[in-house]
Amino acid sequence: MDKIALGPKTLLYPMPTVLVGANVGGKPNYMTAAWCGMACMAPPMISVAISHVRHTLKGIEENKTFSINVPPVRELVKTDYVGITPGARVDKSKVFESFYGKLKTAPMVKECSVSLECKLFNTMDCGSHVLAVGEIMETYVDKPVVAGGAPDIKKVDPIIYSDGRYYRIGDFVADAYSAGKAYMKE
């Protein structure tokens, strides 16, 4: 198979679409991000890359807390809106219904089936973006999406971002930590 060199690109598949929440000036503010991923298992941490110009970053730095919310496909229009609308110019506090957990300063989105309440662990200036790493202090999941003690990804119905487009999760293909056993037998 021939490969084509495209130069340094931010291509990683799939990328989750998340809503990052932070209080800015005492009001909940949300922004859309796709550069988000798990950073550590023990203690549980998550990272998100945020442009220096984002209003939400101001709130994260102010309160040392933030949230990561997984919006379902049914919330796509509002999710995209908070990503293309600058919080410094538009009050986005009423776009979603906010709730707070134990930290009291990390607004979370009630319409999202999964919300992670985070205490800021560290930030790193990476150039165009700041990488915010948060320790997950609590995880909130809607009861209807839980099956077998964990969220069912099909019921969560997360929005997936890729190359300027949104997608939906596909089909189950194999069980993790066991599919590779077939290779060991060869």
Image: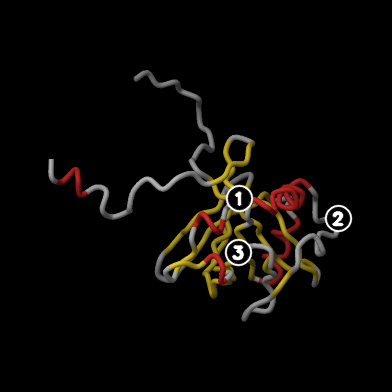
Q: Position of residue 114 (x, y in %)?
A: 58, 64
Q: Is residue 178 left or right of residue 107?
A: left
Q: Position of residue 28 (x, y in %)?
A: 76, 67
From the image, tell me which residue sits under label 2.
Answer: 90
* Residue at image coords 50%, 68%: 146
Q: Quadrant of the N terminus?
A: top left
Q: Nearer the viewer, mark 3 or mark 2?
A: 3
Graded by Cα atoms within 10 Å as few (under 14), some (14 to 19) or many (20 or more), the crowding at tag 1 reads many
From the image, tell me which residue sits under label 1.
Answer: 17
Separation (CA) of disc 3 from disc 1: 13 Å
SS of the residue at dot 3? loop
* Residue at image coords 44%, 20%: 4
From the image, tell me which residue sits under label 3.
Answer: 113
Vertical placement of 63 versus 185: above or below?
below
Q: Position of residue 144 (x, y in %)?
A: 56, 68
Q: Looking at numbered disc 1 in the image, what kind of residue is underneath it? A: Thr
Q: Choose the circle earlier in sequence order: 3 or 1.
A: 1
Labels in figure, total: 3
Q: Residue 107: which quarter of the image? A: bottom right
Q: Position of residue 115 (x, y in %)?
A: 60, 66
Graded by Cα atoms within 10 Å as few (under 14), some (14 to 19) or many (20 or more), the crowding at tag 2 reads few
| Callout 1–callout 2 Cβ contact below 8 Å | no
Disc number placed over residue 29 in the picture, else none: none
Q: Choose the circle earlier in sequence order: 1 or 2.
A: 1
Q: Looking at numbered disc 3 in the image, what kind of residue is underneath it? A: Ser
